[in-house]
Image (cartoon, rainbow, N blue to C red):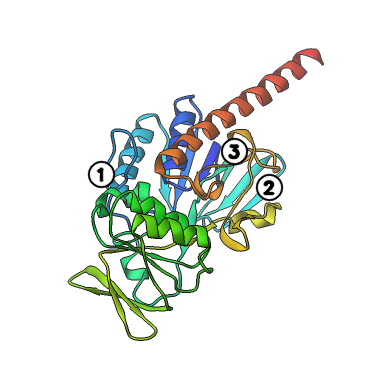
Amino acid sequence: MIDNYDVVIIGGGAAGLSGAIALARSLRTVLVIDAGDPRNAPAGHVHNFLTQDGTPPAELYEKGRRELAGYGGQVTGARARSISRDNDRFRIDLGTRLVEARRLLIATGARDELPAVPGLAGRWGRDVLHCPYCHGWEVRGQRVGVLSTGPAAAHQALLFRQLTDHVTVLTHTGPELTPEQRAQFAGLGIATADGEVVAAESADDHLTGVRLADGATVNLDALVVAPVCRARAELLAPLGLEVTEFRLGDTLMGTYVAAGPGGSTPVPGLFVAGNIADVQAQVISAAAAGLMAGAAINADLIMTDANTAASAVTR
């Protein structure tokens, strides 16, 4: 037996749940498929989310699931194995069951590919950071290092200099600083440490600094990196949707699925929202994109049904 819904949403983070609530409030039958591994799982708290600042991500999503249930929406803890088309419907294989939907919203988010420095991954989301708006307040006034692996490092250094007088750019494998950048750093008191970083070091569950290839150490309280943000879009390739690269110069910063208004894609009836479509989306903007996608899907279904009804009358 195959369970049928108006809309199936793959991804139970901010984008997926926001889209689901908008649809459920419009009396659509909705199923959210949630694998339970959001991008921000390593982070302790969500920030810059109006009225929810400081909320742990898991708590925020649990609140969202409860809200959705109040409107009759469903959530299943599963991982979608594949997506196929059956005439005008989408079929999703969950391994233990098949579900079908008239419309599909993909909100699977992204995964962060961190620089290959030993000791770094274990601190990710705590004192190894990337976004001043997500974590900057928490490291204000502290010793912050910026690991240069591409052209974004200079901009990151300036952003974090707003939050602390103690910023050190670790040149690592990044590009040579321009004379203008060096002048900016000198004027703002931003230090530089040359040489490749071979390890991030910690003690008592806190980052203590980094070790350079020549054996020197730089004492730090936090380390800023620039991960490659890769869209979780593997399910979409069989449907003909490929990812687009987002580059800064020659440096790959991430990948995303290009989308139109409301998250529409070239595949009729398939929409995307959140980090899968926007590498820079934070939790609040992912939630907003999910809401807009939910509204677009509802309008799409309304027009389809109205046109079908009109055709029946004029026959």
Residue 93 occupies quadrant:
bottom right
Q: Nearer the viewer, residue 268 or 93?
A: 268
Return the residue at label 1: 54
Q: Check disc 3 and give the amino acid type.
A: Gly
The residue most toward the left is 204
Q: Is residue 37 visible?
A: no
Q: Earlier in the sequence, mark 3 or mark 1?
A: 1
Residue at horizontal 40%, vertical 39%? 284
Q: Earlier in the sequence, mark 1 or mark 2?
A: 1
Q: Which mark is residue 263?
A: 3
Residue 305 occupies quadrant:
top right
State the image coordinates of residue 133 (x, y, percent, origin top left). Answer: 36, 46
State the image coordinates of residue 290 (x, y, percent, origin top left). Answer: 49, 37
Q: Image check: 279 left or right of 197? A: right
Return the residue at label 2: 85
Q: Is residue 205 visible?
A: yes
Q: Is residue 67 above or below residue 224?
A: above
Q: Check disc 1 and give the amino acid type.
A: Gly
